[in-house]
């Protein structure tokens, strides 16, 4: 299955081959830092009101801000799910299976105390709408189940793990298989694919990146075209490598300029 064009494949191969992409090279403290910024990123996309500093204090020290319970619970659930996945992959040296049951289990974890138990890890039987787009996901429960199964049958055609990550993220989010928590679920599935391949997953604390994420996924909802989200996904990884790698050349971003990279720390991030 072809998700990336030639230029995107060049970027993907660079990311896969960079020593600064490797999850296995992160220390325990760097893993915790990664988990916190990833949770902040995933939560902020959903409109979570916690700042990065508040997220950091909540997840490190358990001190919640004077904000709604759901925001704190969303971040804690994301953190618990993310850390569980990392521990399984790194300490137990296993790959998380990419199948329907995994996605159902992930959804149940990230929606704990946020949805009724009857809706956690269960494909929806009611129609849903998505804010900000005219796209309407399938509403028939049998169609939802069939398309959900088809996504996992087709994803095995992706031989490049970064293409597989984009494919699963975009298609799970577009189907909206659950009553709520769909994009959070799809971002964690995307990250599982990457961590299975020993690649640090996509994250950011920058408003511009979060806006570009939203634009890319809404474009996919409406057109079925991966290109805009794929550009965001790959360029975000290249930007991270630019921040953390010794000086080297990387493939040009979408506008075509060659970038040079400086600095050296595998999990550095500008988060203020």
Image (cartoon, grey):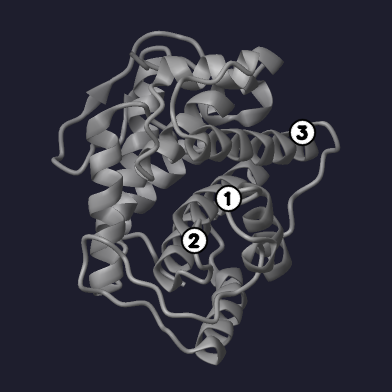
How far across and down, in percent of the image, does residue 115 sit?
59, 57
Occupied quadrant, residue 133? bottom left
What distance separates the C-alpha of mark 1 from that of mark 3? Answer: 24 Å
Q: Are marks 2 and 1 in contact (CB under 8 Å)?
A: yes
Count of numbered circles in the view? 3
Q: Which residue is mark 2?
A: 180
How far across and down, in percent of the image, does residue 209 sit?
28, 36
Left or right: 152 in relation to 88: left
| Mark whose residue sits in front, 2 or 3 | 2
What distance separates the C-alpha of mark 2 from that of mark 1? Answer: 9 Å
Q: Report the disc number at residue 162.
A: none
Give neighbour class at mark 3: few <14, some 14-19, many 20+ (Cα, 10 Å): some
From the viewer's side, name the closer residue of 95 and 140: 140
| Mark whose residue sits in front, 1 or 3 | 1
Looking at the picture, does residue 217 appear above or below residue 33? Answer: below
Residue at 41%, 20% in the rendered image = 52
| Mark whose residue sits in front, 2 or 1 | 1
Q: Which residue is mark 3?
A: 87
Provide the secondary structure element on which disc 2 rests. Answer: loop
What distance separates the C-alpha of mark 2 from that of mark 3? Answer: 26 Å
Looking at the picture, does residue 60 appear above or below residue 113? Answer: above
Give neighbour class at mark 2: few <14, some 14-19, many 20+ (Cα, 10 Å): some
How far across and down, in percent of the image, does residue 263 sit?
39, 8
Left or right: 245 in relation to 98: left
Mark nearer the N terminus (2 vs 1): 1
Q: Which residue is mark 1?
A: 114
């Amino acid at each position: 299955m072809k998700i990336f064009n030639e230029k995107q494949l060049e970027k993907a191969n660079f990311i896969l081959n960079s020593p600064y992409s490797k999850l296995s090279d992160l220390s325990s403290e760097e893993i915790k830092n990664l988990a916190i910024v990833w949770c902040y990123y995933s939560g902020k996309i959903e409109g979570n009101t916690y700042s990065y500093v508040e997220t950091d204090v909540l997840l490190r020290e358990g001190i919640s801000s004077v904000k709604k319970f759901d925001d704190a619970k969303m971040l804690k659930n994301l953190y618990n799910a993310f850390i569980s996945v990392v521990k399984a992959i790194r300490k137990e040296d296993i790959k998380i299976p990419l199948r329907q049951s995994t996605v159902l289990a992930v959804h149940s974890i990230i929606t704990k105390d946020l949805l009724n138990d009857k809706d956690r890890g269960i494909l929806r039987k009611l129609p849903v709408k998505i804010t900000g787009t005219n796209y309407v996901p399938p509403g028939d429960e049998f169609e939802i189940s069939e398309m959900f199964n088809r996504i996992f049958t087709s994803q095995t055609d992706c031989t490049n793990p970064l293409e597989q990550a984009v494919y699963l993220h975009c298609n799970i989010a577009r189907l909206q298989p659950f009553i709520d928590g769909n994009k959070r679920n799809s971002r964690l599935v995307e990250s599982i694919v990457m961590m299975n391949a020993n690649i640090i997953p996509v994250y950011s604390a920058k408003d511009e990146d979060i806006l570009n994420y939203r634009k890319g996924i809404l474009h996919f909802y409406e057109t079925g075209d991966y290109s805009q989200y794929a550009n965001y996904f790959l360029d975000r990884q290249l930007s991270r490598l630019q921040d953390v790698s010794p000086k080297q050349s990387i493939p040009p971003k979408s506008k075509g300029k060659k970038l040079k990279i400086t600095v050296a720390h595998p999990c550095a991030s500008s988060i203020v």
